[in-house]
Image (cartoon, rainbow, N blue to C red):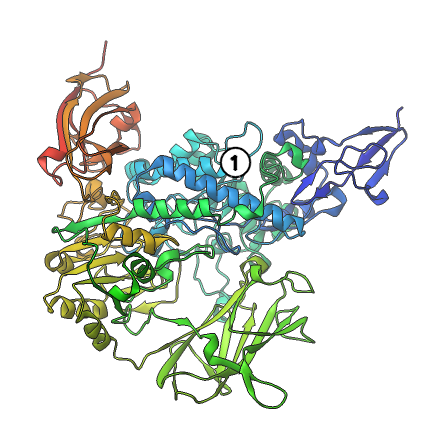
Amino acid sequence: MQRHEILNKFNLLGAAASIALLTGCASLDGRETPAELVETTAETAPVILPYMDASLSPEARARDLVSRMTLEEKAAQMYDKAAGIPRLGLHEYNWWNEALHGVARAGHATVFPQAIGLASTWDEDLMLEIATTISDEGRAKHHYYASEDVYAMYGGLTFWSPNINIFRDPRWGRGQETYGEDPFLTGRMAVNFVNGIQGDDDKYLKAIATVKHYAVHSGPEPSRHRDDYHASDADLWETYLPAFKMAFDETDVGSVMCAYNAVWGAPACGSERLMVDLLRDELKFDGYVVSDCGAIGDFYYDEAKHEAGEAPYAAHDYVDTRAEAAALSVKMGTDLNCGDGEGNKMDALPDAVAQGLIDEATIDQSVERLYTALFRLGMYDDPALVPWADTPLDIVASDEHIALSEQAARQSLVLLKNDGILPLAPETKVAVIGPNADNWWTLVANYYGRPTQPVTALEGVKEKIGAENVTYAVGSTIAGDNYSNYKPVPASALFHEDADGNLVPGVKAAYYPNKTLEGEPTLEQVEEKIDFYWDRTPSTGGLNDEFSATWDGVIVPEADGVYRFQPSRWSEVEINGEAVGEMDGVEMQAGEAYSVRMVLKFDSGWPRDQLDKYAYLNWTDVSRDLKAEAMAAAEDADVILFFGGIDANLEGEEMGVELDGFLGGDRTHIKLPESQETLLKALQATGKPVVMVNFSGSAMGLNWENENLPAIVQAFYPGEQAGKAIADLLWGEFSPSGRLPVTFYKSVDDLPDFGDYSMANRTYKYYEGEPLYPFGHGLSYTSFDYSGLSVPETHDASEPLPVSATVTNTGDMPGREVVQAYIQHQDRAHAAIPQVELVAFEVVELAPGESQTVSLTLSAERIGYYAIDGKFVTPQGTEAILSLGSGQPGFVKDSAIETSSVRFERNE
């Protein structure tokens, strides 16, 4: 027998953990390996346990590792805040990270346009580049945090993005997170996002993307924890599954998130049909599945907790106990539960095994999938082996990345209408008016990082033409009694008393190493204003996840007014000793001193980790006559620029908003809020031209605006460089090229009930009415003509179909054109066959007078369709109309589209 020294703990090397091959007791990084980490057997030759051996497959390593865990240790790995196992050399790991349009909730990062805006670029190459940039920043942040031994939420390499649900109804608040209403466009953007996030190394993953929310999920938000949706087989395969299928077929996507809602009577994360028959067996997904946060808890309804106010959702009532919920989810293939504390149902797995609800081998399979993923990330390997382990932190929000964000913003803007007023002349004096002109939230949307160079529309216009040529007024509330013009309480208004009782600048800040302000503060200092963010504060000195703070001082306003205060989340404000809610107005006099105290406590029941900790105090004077200010600002302007719409404080994920047009994150109608429309009508009545820039993550029924305004731009939520991009578009620095990834309907009254998951009369593929603006719509400052369409007269639909046409820039400006190919089957055997369907697209850039032949190949899958029973149909003996052009047939001028028929006959 030989003597073996067995290293049974990984040596953590800075940002990534390394495997240590022991020679004596030296580890790979040259540091001494502690004696307690070395286990000695009978002989002396050094060996590595299989799970430490980077030469083995990730699957083999995971199997060996899991075989060394106890049942309780396995269960502790199966929720987002996975426990460390020191005896095996495993550090803790938090699986939860977000990267929807930039690394989110982890300090500063480059903020790109919201996902719906990225989809409006229709640019696959751009999406790949953006996702690559996001994963660069994610790698840099992860390694920095790991070097500090921080493995908190939003610090890992497992990103719960992208959202590839279909935006089937404009009322859905989370539709902004998607790539729109078309499954093919969604799938193409998803494929490039996943590939950019995960990298192209043969062995290691750069990061892991998670496609969500599998699979039939798109609101309503308020009832998502208890709803049961029923989709037909044809709708399932025509609409809800294609983007997932494309991701599985064309990428090595590592993770799937299953949804809250039930489908066909069973919770999605516990549905045998969804999770086993479709996901694992038919779609052949072999990565790990994570539940949406709290979804496994929705399996059962705890009546006592609900009555006590501790369980707000009357969920699915599908099983009776925690153990049954945990066992069912794992048996159906859910490997990871998002939710800790009461939300962690996986801690019931040992009890479930004891009850015979699940066997340990099934649990092993789940934990093996999880550690296969971590080994593929190189998380426990020598950093020298992992391509991205030395990614420097200074690439985060670098100039190059900010420039890419600006490029994406430019390409995302959609010119909906232009009667010739745009582009504006250089000498134009403008009035910038509207609740979104200087609204930070229109830049970042939801799931955002903290931008380093945010530029609002107002700032962009001023920078473009000079502040002396711009007048500004907010003009109205953004909706109802909700104001968008909150700004930080300025340092010039904040003071504290010194030892002699004199007011001196700044407020006193005290930081405590717990959530309850107990004991002595770790850090006390004077700060010029209340504007804290973790990455601007040292993470030493005892500050940790149990973090809280106070700010005390005096506010001296510069003007009389009725002020509303808007503190950051998990914060409370007192003025003169009285608690102040966000909708409470405090009457203040100029020059008078008012005591202010703000308390930050992370005890909301769902606290964020230190990487997402911030605090601010904003205010606004609600006594001002906003409309009068707007009319005064318009007096000397040549053109009025109205920046309106909504923002991510009104639409989003399961929100507490309830006012006209909005409910719980969703929308109840799609009209412009009344306060804005009233103002717009007054501005239009001045006789001055009004150009509208609309911000929203969803379609807007801009009916009056379309009839009465000369130009409308749809901005979606365009990222941190929004203001620069918008100003450049308005003054003609580039020709707009964005195209709508959704249909803009005139009214939700033209649509089925929000909760009806049948696709009948939904999206451009099935809508029977007349849209305000169709899917694929977008104008340009130049013009493109199409000619010479080449399509075979007959074709075997089981083979790829080649089509081509010549595109010519017939205008005076260089421009990007989105060439769109559609198919219209002439024999619609049933209603689930689309009346028109996008089958291919390509972006081309052409100089004035330049022509290019665009050749596209339509796969057999793009040509066919699904039958009522969900079986794929290859057309035979039928005809279809194919078109190549600037948009859908019937919605663009004749010169901007070419059409031809093809008959499908099988070759014998």
- Mark 1 surroundings within 10 Å by alpha-carbon count, few (fewer than 14), some (14 through 19), many (20 or more): some
Tell me where residue 637 sits by quadrant.
bottom left
- Residue annotated with mark 1: 287
- Image coordinates for residue 831, horizontal then vertical, percent: 19, 38
Asked whether 47 or 125 is in front, the reply is 125
Asked whether 828 or 28 is in front, the reply is 28
Tell me where residue 766 sits by quadrant.
top left
Q: Residue at x 51, y 48 (%)?
A: 396
Is residue 88 shown left or right of residue 32?
left
Name the kind of residue labelled 1 in the image: Gly
Q: Answer whether residue 806 is visible to the viewer in this image.
A: yes
- Image coordinates for residue 853, horizontal then vertical, percent: 22, 24
Which residue lies most toward the top here?
908
Can you say whether 339 is above or below 572 in the image? above
Quadrant the C terminus occupies: top left
Can you say whether 451 is above or below 758 in the image? below
- Image coordinates for residue 900, horizontal then vertical, percent: 13, 25
Is residue 168 shown left or right of residue 68?
left
Q: Residue at x 23, y 61 (%)?
A: 669
Element class at badge 1: loop
Asked whether 645 or 570 is in front, the reply is 645
Q: Residue at x 22, y 43 (%)?
A: 775
- Image coordinates for residue 183, horizontal then vertical, percent: 31, 38
